[in-house]
Amino acid sequence: MKAIWTGSINFGLVNIPVKMYSATEERSIDLDMLDSRDNERIRFQRVNEKTGKEVAWENIVKGFKTDGGYVILTDEDFEQASIKKSKTIAIDEFVPQEQVAELLYKTPYFLEPDKGGGEAYALLRQALKYSRKVGVSTFVMRSKENLALLDTYGEAIIVHVIRFANEVRDPADLKLPDNKPKKRELEMAMSLIDQYSGDFELEKYEDEYQDKLMEIIEQKQQGKKPKIRKLEVETTGAKDLMKKLQESLKLKKAS
């Protein structure tokens, strides 16, 4: 794996040099965009608006538009905007993980101790596990300030980049039901949850969609026409709710 950020964790007066790596990877079939008229590949180019010519990556810079033109920013400018946050993940406080809504989680990254940081890294890892709390921090990566939580995953310290408050929309704008369910219906729904309850095992769940899509690609490659299947979903209304709950419970018992 290639490190995407290097710096240190600041834990009180303890500094732990670390390297950051992406903790996840996308699994998808590589599809190209084609012109439907001749199936030729469509390419996207970085074009100068004035000359119409393509611009190489090494000649591209970032700029802020003003009335007098553009103010060009260099990598050093972005770093100097907050030299500490560009190089340090400083833990500001520790909070119970359950107080952080799942909606806030965005992207996970693994942290690996750099030279000389192994002992302090192990100490923080164990302290996080024993306390059952997560460290709250902000740091800068790729010219953007991130709000983050430090937690553990197995034997690794993981950084969860989470959303700031102003990035979450207010659910009050949604049209949500305000009626309360009937007692008997709620009891049956809870029974259904109990029947389907178990320990979470990540390995049980696989990305079946990509495999099915690959089957369709192989069929079309062989000149076969994939069978078209339709899914019809019937909405369960208030009058059918009890019946559907009863049938669901019977179905689970029979399986």
Image (spheres, helix red, strand yellow):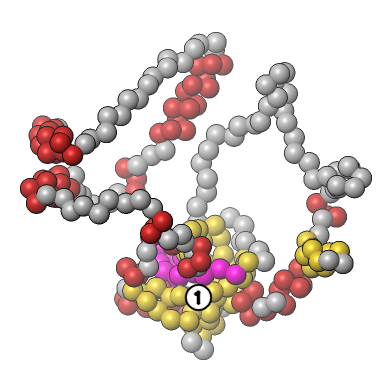
Quarter assignment of residue 255: top left
Quarter assignment of residue 69: bottom right
Query: What residue is pinned by disc 1?
Result: 137
Range of magenta residues: 145-159
In this picture, residue 201 sits left or right of residue 245? right
Q: Is residue 125 visible?
A: yes
| Residue located farthest toward the left when viewing the structure as drawn | 184
Crowding near the residue tagged with mark 1, few <14, some 14–19, many ≥20 C-alpha atoms within 10 Å:
many
In this picture, residue 158 sits left or right of residue 88? left
Q: Is residue 126 visible?
A: no
| Residue located farthest toward the bottom when viewing the structure as drawn | 13
In this picture, residue 201 sits left or right of residue 11? left
Instruction: Out of 224 and 64, give the one closest to the viewer.
Output: 64
Q: Residue at x 83, y 66 (%)?
A: 67
Q: Residue at x 37, y 21 (%)?
A: 230
Q: Is residue 33 above or below residue 98?
A: above
Under mark 1, the amino acid is Ser
| Residue located farthest toward the right when viewing the structure as drawn | 51
Task: Indicate whether residue 151 is drawn in magenta.
Answer: yes
Q: Is residue 131 above or below residue 74?
A: below
Q: Quadrant of the N terminus?
A: bottom right
Query: Could you tell me residue 136's position as x and y percent?
Result: 45, 75
Query: Could you tell me residue 171's position as x and y percent?
Result: 39, 58
Instruction: Out of 200 and 3, give the one closest to the viewer.
Output: 200
Task: Indicate whether residue 150 is drawn in magenta.
Answer: yes
Instruction: Out of 38 and 111, give the one closest to the viewer.
Output: 38
Q: Residue at x 32, y 77 (%)?
A: 131
Query: Could you tell me residue 95's position as x and y percent?
Result: 37, 76
In this picture, residue 130 sits left or right of residue 142? left
- Disc 1 element: strand
Query: Could you tell me residue 137's position as x and y percent?
Result: 50, 75
